[in-house]
Structure formats: structure tokens, C-alpha cells
Image (cartoon, helix red, strand yellow):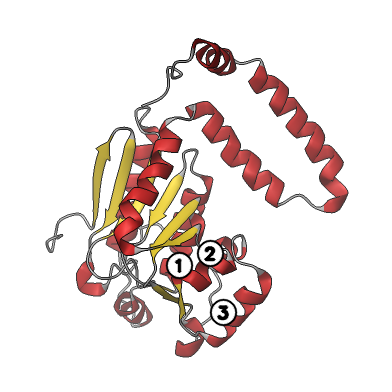
Amino acid sequence: MADATGPLVRRDTERGITTLTLDSPANRNALSARLRTDLADGLAAAMADDAVRAVVLTGAGPAFCAGADLKEVAAERAGRAPDPSAPGMADLFAAIMAAPKPVVAKLNGPARAGGIGLVAAADLAFAPDGTTFAFTEVRIGVVPAIISVPVAARMHDRHLARYFLTGEAFDAAAAAEAGLLTAAVPADRMDAEVGAVLDGLRAAAPTALARTKEVLATARGVRPADRGAALREMAETSRAFFASDDAAEGRAAFFEKRPPRWVL
């Protein structure tokens, strides 16, 4: 558990996977200025480390993330702004979504409001069956504006409208059905489920992973009128990667019945 002055995000790396643990359980890992700064720093360090293949985002204590730190919001409204150099929530979500390495959210408990933005910004997200979610903004007189960008990229329109407009709580199974989660998992299977995914990422070529993240983002945003151009761009990407050194190594490993050199 973090102390009053220590970091609010713990960073551990094992077999090419960096785990960033939100460690401010006293306020349910709310996105305070300190926590946002520590999380952004941890993410940047993982992205800059060639030995890191992917990032896991999780939390300490009974909750994953309660969203905005309402005490800081009140202080700011009273003219006592927190650290002005801290990244905003918009900066944090953008950094996760644009990260060149996969980010996997492994929830340890409920997420609310801006905390769900972290879940949606991640590439993959898993939560125990008993986890609950809620976009509580409308119930305290505000709007889920910033988080609408990552969340709308994941959730189906009708589900999104219902949960944004009502602020009602929904469980992990409903979150998976709505597209927010990759899967709702029995609590005693979480480590095994996420571990299998991480082993899959360890087996992937790093350059291919980074470009595949870009391809996914591009494909999601293509308008019908632009599909021809997008297909031509993707054909060029495909040709370039089939001609790459990694592709040659992948083919050689396949025929020689051995793991490629990048497998961790």
C-alpha cells in the first residue's frame, strides 16, 4: 500500500510484461493528480523499454478505480488547484489508446465513471464476474464527456445510451455483452485467463503488435466512402510486413518447428 508521499502506482516487470497497479485504496484508486502523473510516467517507461512486450493495468484494494477525485475537483473549484503539471484524464486516455504496445486491463473490483475510461482505453479488458460498473456522472449533475471517446469506441450504441443516460449499475456479464469488456471471468480463473492472453502477446513479434494496434484503430474509423483507400493502404502494409525480416523469421520458425526468436 502506498504511503502519504510514495508513488500511487506500483510498477513491476516479469517476462516482458509490466504491471501497473493503482495503489491508492483509501480513495478507491481515484484519478487524483498524483495518481495520473504516476500512471502516465509508468506507462511511458514501459513504452520506452524494449524488453517490455505489453502492459497490465490493475488496482490495489477492493476497487479498480472510482473515477475523478471529487475532493480535488471541489478544491479546484475553490481556487486550490492540484499540481498543474499533472496530465489530465484526456491526456491519460489518449496515451493508453495510442500506446504502441498492448495494454490489458485486469480489474480487481468495481469501476466507476472515469475509471471505466481506463477500461475502455485499454486494448483488452477482463473483470471478475462480481464486478460492477456505473457511469455516475449524470447522478451528480455532470456529463461523461471525456470518457465518451474511449467508451464509445468499445460499447454498442444502445447499451452506451442506456448506461450513460441512467447512471445505473451493471455487472461484468452486461459489460461484456455491451462490448466494454473482453470477457467476464470467474474470480478464481482471472489469473489463468489473463495469463493465457499475456502468453499470446509474448509470442507475437513486437513490430507486428505495434502495427496491428494501428491497423485496428484505422479499421474502426473508416467511413464507407473511404474503404477503397483504406484497403489500398492496408494492402501496402501487408506487402511490407510479408517482406520484413520478422516475417522471414516467422516462416523459418514454422518450417523448422521452433519458436520465433522474439518469443519470451
Q: Please tell me in which quadrant of the rendered image residue 36 appears.
A: bottom left
Q: Position of residue 23 (x, y in %)?
A: 23, 60
- The circle on residue 22 is none
Give the quarter of the image for residue 27: bottom left
Q: Amino acid at mark 1?
A: Ile
Residue 184 in percent (x, y) is at 44, 63
Where disc 2 sits, the SS reads loop
Q: Is residue 133 left or right of residue 219?
A: left
| 136 in relation to 184, above or below | below
Q: Which residue is mark 2?
A: 180
Q: Earlier in the sequence, mark 2 or mark 1?
A: 1
Q: Which amino acid type is marked by label 3?
A: Phe
Q: Are marks 1 and 3 in contact (CB under 8 Å)?
A: no
Is residue 40 at all visible to an observer of this figure?
no
What is the C-alpha distance between the residues marked 3 and 2? 13 Å
If you read the primary sequence from the N terminus, does the residue marked by circle 1 or circle 3 appear first? 1
Residue 28, quarter of picture: bottom left
Residue contact at pointers 3 and 2, CB within 8 angstroms: no
Q: Which mark is residue 164?
A: 3
Please provide percent x and percent y for residue 38: 29, 53
Direction from residue 2 to residue 62 in the image, left or right: right
Residue at figure coordinates x 23%, y 62% from the top left: 60
Q: Residues within 10 Å of mark 3 (few under 14, many from 20)?
A: many
| Residue type of the residue flagged with mark 2 | Leu
Q: From the image, which quarter does the N terminus lie in?
A: bottom left
Query: Distance from label 1 to label 3 (Cα)?
Result: 12 Å
Mark nearest the camera among 2 and 1 is 2
Per the rendering, the mark at residue 116 is: 1
Q: Are marks 2 and 1 in contact (CB under 8 Å)?
A: yes
